[in-house]
């Protein structure tokens, strides 16, 4: 993609320098501004981004072990991720999907791409052609459905889209139902009325707006308008392969309440991705460098965590933070995970979602003093009772949490008093125990 090429060129200027000083950082920011504005990213967003990059690059605390160059790269990466949105997680259960959008944005193609996506995950799919405006629209979808081998429904002579949808849904037995609606040349009353009718007939679980990357930052305005008639689950940005304005479309959508769900990267059904800002920016900037850098940062952070562990008392708050991290990054991440590689049962590091929610509620019901000193809780049953009540959990559950905490605390203390602790951890880190850590 054009944006990626230009971004990489801008960064290469920095990374090619023997050392990096303030001037080099400022020059990079100027280049970034040019590249992003050329990609139709809103000027205000670009300036906010530049300001943050400048501040964080030059003024914020740098991890000691990173060079200034690495520090700047990391900042640019993180700020671009923040600019270009989040990560979408499509649901994999039975549900109904509606696609809407203006003329030629790529709705029908995207219907077949989503159908293919779910089909290849083992779900049965029905696509419904409810575009009654364009003569060949139904045939187009019928052919695409054949190609991806999913079921197809329409009523050829029917002029009312909502009626087709009602009839289609009524006989549907598939896990996933996807409705293709007609395009309009503008956001007008007709479009609103038709969408409302289809909505009433389908009751979609997910509604995606399809926009073409060509429209750049106008994508944000469209998302806002459509969001008003029917809340959008996300936006599908198509033609990211051919447009120089993808950055504008992505950043504008990200600045609204809607989020980018999928991106289209070509005409074929496989040219379709779930949107993941980390991966996307990683790719834009050239993955190997960034992935290596983020890995390094994570390793340093873990080392700093270990130092903290050695110095500080182990508290409930730290315990919880580590559980959360293990959940996000996998059981082998972070300090507890590394100890876990030796002794801690995996289940403890991989608490279910429900349990984590309960733990969180319990911690929220604790006083700051309790969070720092778990002994307070051990000594007073009344405190346990209060926390259970405050968090809507059972006393036995609070005690279970405390007992897990204690087990961990014992282990940490054991390691702390063991002189081989550090060298053991260092060996583990060098031995690639961190290698299995997920970075995204
Ligand atoms: N290069 C590229 N072309 C795409 C992409 N998505 C769709 N197209 C092409 O864009 C054109 C329009 O796509 P459609 O899916 O028919 O668009 P639509 O929104 O259904 O159009 P109407 O129903 O007429 O409003 C077709 O030629 C597609 O092949 C994409 O991600 N990349
Ligand atoms: Mg169409």
Image (spheres, rainbow, N blue to C red):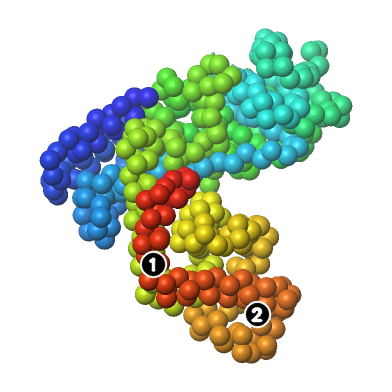
Residue at the image position 73 percent from the left and 39 percent from the top: 93
Examine the rendered structure and indicate whether residue 100 appears above or below residue 330: above
Judged left or right of residue 196, residue 428 is left
Give the image quarter of residue 354. Answer: bottom right
Instruction: From the top left corner, tell me how far across and down residue 32 is, in percent.
Output: 26, 38
Determine the image quadrant of residue 388.
Answer: bottom right
Q: Is residue 7 left or right of residue 98?
A: left
Q: Nearer the viewer, residue 430 or 55?
A: 430
Q: Residue at x 62, y 39 (%)?
A: 90
Q: Secondary structure at mark 2?
A: helix
Against 289, is 163 above or below?
above
Q: Which residue is mark 2?
A: 387
Which quadrant of the rendered structure holds the N terminus? top left
Residue behind mark 1: 420
Where residue 277 sits, quadrant-wise, is: top left
In this rendering, the answer to whether 430 lies above or below 61 is above
Distance, label 2 to label 1, CA atoms, is 38 Å
- Residue 421 pos. (x, y %): 40, 67
- Residue at 40%, 49% in the rendered image: 431
Label 1 SS: loop
From where the camera sits, is residue 363 visible?
no
């Amino acid at each position: 993609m054009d944006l990626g090429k230009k971004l990489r060129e801008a960064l290469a200027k920095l990374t090619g320098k023997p050392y990096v000083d303030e001037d080099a950082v400022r020059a990079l920011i100027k280049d970034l501004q040019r590249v992003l504005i050329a990609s139709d990213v809103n000027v205000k967003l670009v300036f906010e981004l530049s300001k943050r990059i400048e501040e964080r690059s030059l003024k914020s605390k740098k991890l000691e072990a990173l060079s200034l160059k690495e520090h700047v790269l990391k900042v640019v990466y993180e700020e671009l991720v923040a600019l270009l949105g989040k990560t979408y997680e499509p649901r994999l259960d039975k549900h109904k999907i509606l696609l809407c959008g203006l003329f030629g944005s790529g709705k029908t193609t995207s219907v077949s791409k989503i159908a293919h996506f779910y089909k290849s995950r083992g779900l049965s799919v029905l696509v419904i052609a409810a575009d009654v405006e364009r003569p060949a629209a139904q045939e187009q979808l019928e052919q695409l459905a054949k190609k991806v081998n999913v079921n197809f429904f329409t009523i050829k002579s029917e002029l009312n889209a909502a009626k087709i949808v009602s009839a289609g849904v009524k006989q549907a037995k598939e896990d996933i139902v996807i409705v293709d609606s007609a395009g309009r040349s503008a956001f007008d009353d007709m479009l609103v009325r038709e969408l409302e009718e289809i909505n009433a007939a389908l009751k979609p679980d997910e509604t995606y707006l399809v926009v073409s990357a060509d429209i750049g930052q106008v994508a944000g305005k469209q998302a806002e308008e459509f969001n008003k008639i029917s809340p959008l689950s996300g936006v599908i940005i198509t033609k990211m392969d051919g447009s120089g304005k993808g950055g504008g479309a992505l950043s504008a959508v990200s600045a609204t309440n809607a989020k980018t769900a999928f991106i289209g990267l070509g005409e074929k059904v496989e040219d379709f991705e779930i949107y993941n800002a980390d991966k996307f920016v990683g790719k834009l900037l050239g993955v190997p460098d960034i992935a290596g850098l983020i890995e390094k940062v994570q390793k340093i952070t873990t080392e700093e965590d270990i130092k903290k562990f050695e110095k500080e008392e182990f508290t409930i708050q730290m315990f919880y933070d580590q559980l959360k991290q293990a959940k996000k990054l996998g059981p082998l991440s972070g300090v507890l995970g590394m100890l876990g590689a030796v002794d801690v049962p995996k289940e403890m590091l991989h608490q279910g979602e429900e349990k984590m929610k309960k733990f969180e509620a319990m911690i929220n019901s604790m006083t700051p003093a309790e969070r720092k000193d778990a002994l307070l809780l051990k000594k007073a049953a009344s405190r346990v009772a209060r926390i259970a009540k405050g968090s809507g959990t059972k006393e036995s559950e609070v005690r279970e949490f405390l007992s897990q905490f204690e087990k961990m605390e014992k282990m940490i203390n054991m390691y702390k008093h063991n002189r081989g602790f550090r060298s053991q951890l260092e060996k583990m880190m060098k031995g690639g125990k961190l290698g299995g850590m997920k970075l995204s």
